[in-house]
Amino acid sequence: MFKSLLALLLTVSGLKAFAQKTTITGYYAGDEAHLDAYNHYQLDYIIFSFCHLKGNRLHVANAADSALIRKMVSYKQTHPGLKVLLSLGGWGGCATCSPVFATKKGREEFAASARELLAYFKADGIDLDWEYPVVAGYPGHPYRTADRQNFTLLVKAMRNQFGPNYEISFASGGSTICVDSSFEWKKVMEVVDKVNLMSYDLVHGNSTASGHHTALYSTPQQLESTDNAVRKMIAAGVPSRKIIIGAATYARVFQVADTTDHGLYRKAVFDHAISYKDLYDSLASRNGFIQYYDPVSKSPYAFHAGRKAFVTYDDSVSIREKMLYVKKMNLGGIMFWQLMDDKPQDGVLNMMYSVRKNEE
C-alpha cells in the first residue's frame, strides 16, 4: 500500500513538474511613449533596461526613466502575474562594476540602494547585466579574475538585504569563455532565482567569420550555441529550472568574402544590425535576398549573393524550436532582447506566447 501511494505521489509530482509554465521575459530599452503598443499580457517578466552605478549606488538616470518604470509597474493592476525587474548595466553600461563590486563597502551600499529603489517603485527584483565579470566586454571597461568571487559576494549581499521579498536574476554571456570563466555557478545559483542566458551575439561584431548569432545547436563549424551553453551550465551544477535561454529580436548582417555556401561560415566582417520589426522588408526577395534554413543548428539565415551580405536572425521556426527545447531540457523559460526591436503585433513575443499556448 505504502509503495503504491509513494509511486502515485512521485507520478503526480513528475506531472506537476512537467506542467510548470515556461516563463516569457522581455527586456525593454525603449521609451514610455511606445510601451503601450506591446502586449504586456503575454509577458511574465518585463525588465527595465537600464539602471547604472552612481558611486556605489544603483541609480535611475532621469525623470523619463522613472516614469517608464512606474508605467511598467502600473501594468500589474490589470496583469497581476507580471513581474517588473530593474536591470543594472548592459553593454557599455557597467564601466565601474568591477572596481565597485571588488569592495565589501561597494557591494553592501549597492545592495542597500537596490532594495530602496525596489521599495520606492514597488518593483519585484533586480537583474544584473554586468558584461562581463572576468572576461573582456565593452572596450576599455576594467575586468579582473577576482570578479568571479566578487560576483558571488555581491549576490549574497543582495540576498541579505532583500530577504525572500525580491527576486535576483542575472544575465550571462552565452559564449564558452563566459560560461566557463565568469561565475562560481553552484555558489551563485544557491542565492539567485534565475540566470538569463544571452544565447545570442554568439557571432558578434568582433567575429572574423559568418555564422549563426543565435544558434540553438552546435554544428561541426560552430561550437557556440544555446545547447552548448546550457549543457555546460547544468554540468557545472546549475538547476535546469533556473536557466532562461535567450532569443533575439534583431538580425546581424555580415559582409562575407565570397559566395560559397550562401555565405555561411565564410570569412566576414560585421556590417550592421536590423530590428525584427524591419527585418522582412529588408530580406524581401525583391531586394535580392534568398532565405535559407540550417537544420543542424535550427537557425534561419539569408544571403544576397550580389552584395555578399549574410544575415543571421531568429524567426518563427527557430523560436518554436527554442520553446520546445525549454520543455525538453526542463528549463525555466525564454527571454529576448529587446521589446522595442520587436513588432508590436505578430512579432517574436507573440510567437513565444502562441507556442506556449499550443504546447502546454
Image: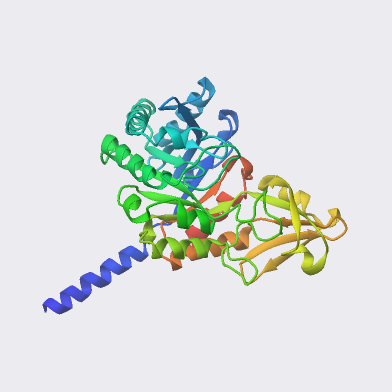
Q: Is residue 292 left or right of residue 149?
A: right
- Tell me the quarter of the image containing the N terminus: bottom left
Residue 98 is situated, as x and y percent measured from the top left of the image, at 45, 37
Q: Is residue 44 visible?
A: no
Residue shown at 51% from the left, 28% from the top: 68
- What is the quadrant of residue 85 in the picture? top left
- Tell me the quarter of the image containing the C terminus: bottom left
Is 183 situated above or below 33? below
Q: Residue furthest top?
A: 63
Residue shown at 32% from the left, 32% from the top: 108
Residue 226 is situated, as x and y percent measured from the top left of the image, at 53, 61
Q: Is residue 284 visible?
A: yes
Q: Tell which of 189 and 343 is nearer to you.
A: 189
Q: Is residue 293 left or right of residue 151?
A: right
Residue shown at 77% from the left, 49% from the top: 281
Q: Is residue 167 left or right of residue 341?
A: left
Residue 145 is situated, as x and y percent measured from the top left of the image, at 44, 47
Q: Residue furthest right?
A: 306
Q: Residue furthest left?
A: 1
Is 51 situated above or below 358? above
Q: Tell which of 231 and 63 is nearer to you.
A: 231
Residue 56 is situated, as x and y percent measured from the top left of the image, at 40, 27
